[in-house]
Image (cartoon, helix red, strand yellow):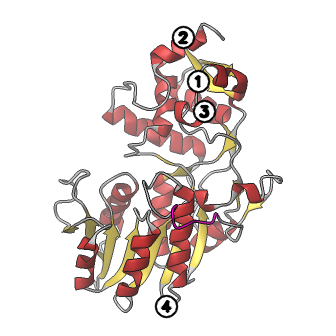
Amino acid sequence: MSTSRLLVLGGTQFIGRALVEEIIASRPDLDVTLFNRGQSNPTLFPDLKKISGDRETSDIEKILAQDWDYIIDVNGYYPNSIEALLPKLRGKVGRYVYVSTVSVYDVDAYMAKPDALVSEDYPMLACSSEQRLGDWSKCYGEKKAECERVILANDWLDTIILRPSIVYGKYDYTERYYYWLQRVQTRNRIIIPDNGIERGNLTFVNDLVSLLIGALSLTDHRTTYNAVTHHINTLRDKINVIADVMNKSPELVSISKEQLGENGIAKQSDFPCSFGGDMLIYDISKTQKDFQIAFTSYRDSVSQTIEYYDAVTKWEAGKRGLSFEAEDLLLKTL
């Protein structure tokens, strides 16, 4: 069997880890090499080739020592470093698959039509020279939008860009989704903001992995896809499905916007996986047509995620969101 050389930038944490596991299990035709700093789970995948380095330094030039049929870029956050790298890859890479985000969309440009389907050609955020710099989590959407523009400006590059929403599932270290799973598993009363009416849709990591692997063989070139993998639903809907799968029935206690402010609570940080307002509705018709992938139902993805945490945790409290103590104090006032 002939093999193709695949370089994964990242590969040992969350999305990258799930990706590499699936490639090992299902794609023996791919000769995989990982490039990362060796700081996250360094003992994973001992049989794979590895290049150690920091992509934000000249270390990244180590990947130029050979040619690659494919590069999957899981952790590209800074447009400046991508801009410096890509010209050096000319003639040395076949296809470049980039993980972007739905945060690139300019929400203010079309939130006046909250039920409009957002297709891949909708307006994106601008990015100033100052926003290009600094911590990756600051001006995250602006940075990612600029990364996309940098990639597409290299008109010789065969690239596929995927835009997931908040990703959840196995190996998720962010605790955004785990917060609600853990609450339902361990609490009889749970505070939710604004009666849980906020709408949003997430991306299940297993489905994102399927899209990333599928992107290697797509016949289309230089194409961008929304990688949102289930229909939009409310926070209350999400929690109700979790409770049903867990066979739990917690009381969901609403806290209003006014009460949030009065108690010094920040909606997005104190209630993880809350978007701070309705998410846009993303059009995935092009994704479904070109990839021919049947996404996992929300209920089944919840079940699989719960199975993962059952195996690796004792459902202890995480570090994100309201503490039990803060929640208990608030519950006395609601």
The disc, 2 or 1, on the residue closer to the chain's N-terminal end is: 1
Left or right: 208 with respect to 225? left
Between marks 4 and 1 in the image, the one whose residue lies nearer the viewer: 1
Seen in the picture, residue 24 relative to 114 is either above or below; the reply is below
Q: Which residue is mark 1?
A: 264
The amino acid type found where label 2 is placed reads: Leu
Q: Is residue 112 magenta?
A: no
Find out whether the residues at labels 4 and 1 contact each other: C-beta distance under 8 Å.
Answer: no
Crowd around label 1: few <14 · some 14–19 · many ≥20 (10 Å): few
Q: Which residue is mark 2?
A: 329
Quadrant the C terminus occupies: top right
Q: Which residue bears the numbered disc 4? A: 156
Q: In the rendering, at what x and y percent does residue 285 appear?
A: 69, 66
| Alpha carbons under labels 3 and 4: distance apart | 43 Å
**How crowded is the residue under tag 2: few (<14 C-alpha within 10 Å), some, or many (20+)?**
few
Magenta extent: 125-131
**Label 3 element class:** helix
* Mark number, residue 267: 3
Residue 327 is situated, as x and y percent measured from the top left of the image, at 53, 17
At label 3, which amino acid type do we have? Lys
Q: CA distance from mark 2 to mark 3?
A: 17 Å
Amino acid under label 1? Gly
**What residue appears at the point 67 percent right and 34 percent down from the top-left corner?**
237
Q: Nearer the viewer, residue 286 or 123?
A: 123
